[in-house]
Image (cartoon, rainbow, N blue to C red):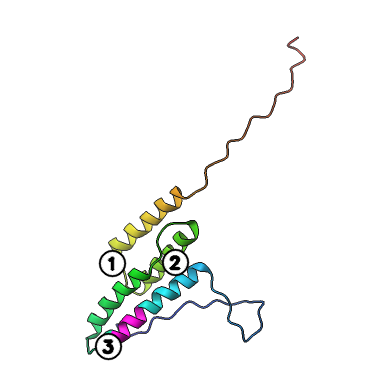
Amino acid sequence: MTEILEAPTVTESAAPADTPAPLSPAAAAVERCLNAYRTERDLQLANGKYDSACHNAARVAYRQAVPYAESLESIQALIACVAQGINFQIYERHESTQILYAAQVSLTANKPPKVEKTPKPQKPNPDES
């Protein structure tokens, strides 16, 4: 696997042209994971490791950079990282399925409780007097 992982690009910003657009939390998490992958892969290449060994070590670094599922925002970032990781063969199929299922459970657990509606007061029935 010799291709270089590329970060997602974010467009459309109201900032001046020379100011980089701020990344969404999910895009920032993906960028962090990709940077961890690239850094570890470059380190392994510099140490004379073969391409497959570099990729395996970089996969571990990518996985360690994935955010924890502790809030709705971090769960969305986790899902984005796993989805991007699937594209770059960071995860095996069964692993990605398990992680995405765990993210789905976390999303359900982090949903705000439903607000119960109070019943509307009924108008008195004129026939019941």
Residue placed under numbered mark 1 in the picture: 92
Cα distance in 3D space between marks 2 and 3: 27 Å
Residue 52 appears left or right of 35: left
Q: Secondary structure at mark 1?
A: loop
Residue at position x 54%, y 41% from top?
114
Q: How would you classify the magenta stretch by its main secondary structure? A: helix
- Characterize the local packing of mark 3: few (<14), some (14-19) or many (20 or more) Cα atoms within 10 angstroms: some
Where's residue 92, x and y in %? 28, 67
Cα distance in 3D space between marks 2 and 1: 16 Å
Which circle, 2 or 1, is nearer the viewer?
Answer: 2
Residue at position x 32%, y 74% from top?
61
Which circle, 1 or 3, is nearer the viewer?
Answer: 3
Where's residue 27, x and y in %? 49, 71
**41 to 102, vertically: above or below:** below
Residue placed under numbered mark 2 in the picture: 80
**108 to 10, vertically: above or below:** above
Residue placed under numbered mark 3 in the picture: 45
Disc 1, disc 3: CB below 8 Å?
no
Disc 2, disc 1: CB below 8 Å?
no
